[in-house]
Image (tube, rainbow, N blue to C red):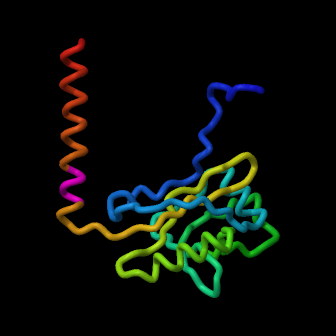
Amino acid sequence: MSKKKPGTPSSTIALNKKAKHEYHIEERFEAGLSLLGWEVKSLRAGKAQLVDAYVLLKNGEAWLLGSHIMPLNTASTHVVADPTRTRKLLLHAKEIAKIIGKVNQTGRTCIPLALYWKKNKVKCEIALVTGKKQFDKRATEKERDWNRQKQRILRDANA
């Protein structure tokens, strides 16, 4: 078995950083992604965004809406590239049924958290979430600041 070489890029393509700030993450799922050739080339170049993306559940299928994959000039010369097209998420039927059952409960939705490489496939990490209230966001930020301050105090005391 060969070890990962130093200097190789991370397997993460895109993160939805806003998700942890805006939502309480309850349950995570790993889904495959149905892509076109030019989209895979763009993802290899790291040209993807998940900022306002969400998952739509319709007719027993899951779809990724609002994700933006910027087309490369060299890769998509022969096709008309739509950067925000709806992409199908590949999940098992039991997982889709579980997600649909929980999304139908009040206050829950399903959003993508990350796009990443797993071997040579593109995977999308999706999560069932509930929205945070304003006071929850402030408490999270206060806790993060306190943890950062503790780390500084410990580092300065040990130095």
Q: Residue furthest right?
A: 78
In the depicted structure, whether residue 108 falls above or below residue 149? below
Identify the image quadrant of residue 11: top right
Q: Is the stretch drawn in magenta largely helix, strand or loop?
A: helix
Name the residue: 55% across, 79% down: 56
In the depicted structure, whether residue 123 falls above or below residue 9? below
Please say whether residue 64 is one of the residues in the magenta stretch.
no
Q: Residue furthest bottom?
A: 59
In the depicted structure, whether residue 90 falls above or below residue 46? below
Name the residue: 65% across, 70% down: 89
Range of residues picked out in magenta = 137-141
How many marks can you see? 0
Q: Is residue 76 left or right of residue 150?
A: right
The C terminus is located in which quarter?
A: top left
Q: Nearer the viewer, residue 77 or 1?
A: 1
The N terminus is located in which quarter?
A: top right
Q: Position of residue 112 (x, y in %)?
A: 51, 64
Name the residue: 17% across, 63% down: 135
Q: Position of residue 85 (x, y in %)?
A: 63, 76
Q: Residue furthest top?
A: 159
Q: Position of residue 138 (x, y in %)?
A: 19, 57
Please say whether residue 140 is one of the residues in the magenta stretch.
yes
Q: Nearer the viewer, residue 9 or 59?
A: 59
Q: Is residue 97 left or right of residue 1?
A: left
Name the residue: 46% across, 76% down: 102
Identify the image quadrant of residue 153: top left
Q: Nearer the viewer, residue 6 or 26?
A: 26
